Image: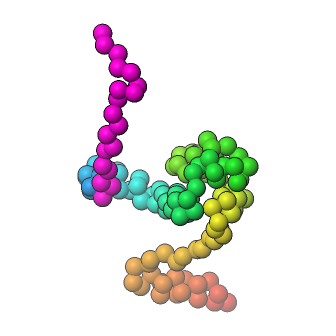
Amino acid sequence: MCWLQMTELKHTPIVHDHAAFLARARTRKGFSQTYESLEAEYQIIGQLLKARTRAGLTQSDVAERMGTTKSAVSRLESSGKHAPSLETLRRYAHAVGCQLQIRLVPDKAPSGSSAKLNSTRAQRASPN
């Protein structure tokens, strides 16, 4: 049996076409619903990664600035069961030279939904 030395191995990056991946994955039953249910999580992770990249920092750099470990930053930047606190997100934002802002954006309701909601509110407020 022939064993290769690590120095003999060549790294060949694999090109990832995320749009093509999503197009194929959306054909699988249940994928779209599950993917969309995680949209907010993916958006937050994307924002974290963009901010760190803009700042020109590594995970180790951010960890040092936050007073934590690289593995903690790695968990923060990946999806999973970990739900960071607002304080952790503030510390991350500060470490990458940003401010944490949280916004609530109205849902894109189908036409007529807001009229229906206003009607329901008016009924509740009625003294009848």
Residue drawn where x is 45% and y is 81% of the image: 113
Q: Does the magenta stretch include residue 14?
A: yes
Q: Is residue 33 left or right of residue 119?
A: left
- Does the magenta portion include 86? no
Residue at 66% in and 49% down: 63
Residue 121: in sight, yes or no? yes
Viewer-proximal residue among 45 and 36 = 45
- The stretch of residues the image draws in magenta is 1-19
**Where in the figure is residue 107, as x and y percent of width and height?**
49, 75
On-image quarter of the N terminus? top left
Residue at the top extreme? 1
Is 32 positioned to the left or the right of 103 in the image?
left
* Residue 128 visible from this viewpoint: no
- Using residue 75 as the reference point, say whether residue 9 is left or right of it: left
Between 21 and 57, the residue placed more toward the observer is 57
Residue at image point 35% right, 29% down: 9
Residue 115 against residue 19 in the figure, above or below:
below
Characterize the magenta stretch by its predominant secondary structure: loop
| x and y percentages locating residue 7 in the rendered image | 40, 27
Instruction: Give coordinates of residue 64: x percent, y percent.
Output: 69, 49
Write down the quadrant of residue 99 in the picture. Answer: bottom right
Residue 128 occupies quadrant: bottom right
As rendered, which of 48 and 108 lies closer to the eye? 48
Residue at the spot x=58%, y=45% of the render? 75
Residue 105 position within the rendered picture, expressed as x and y whole percent measured from the top left: 54, 76
Find residue 26 and report its image quarter.
bottom left
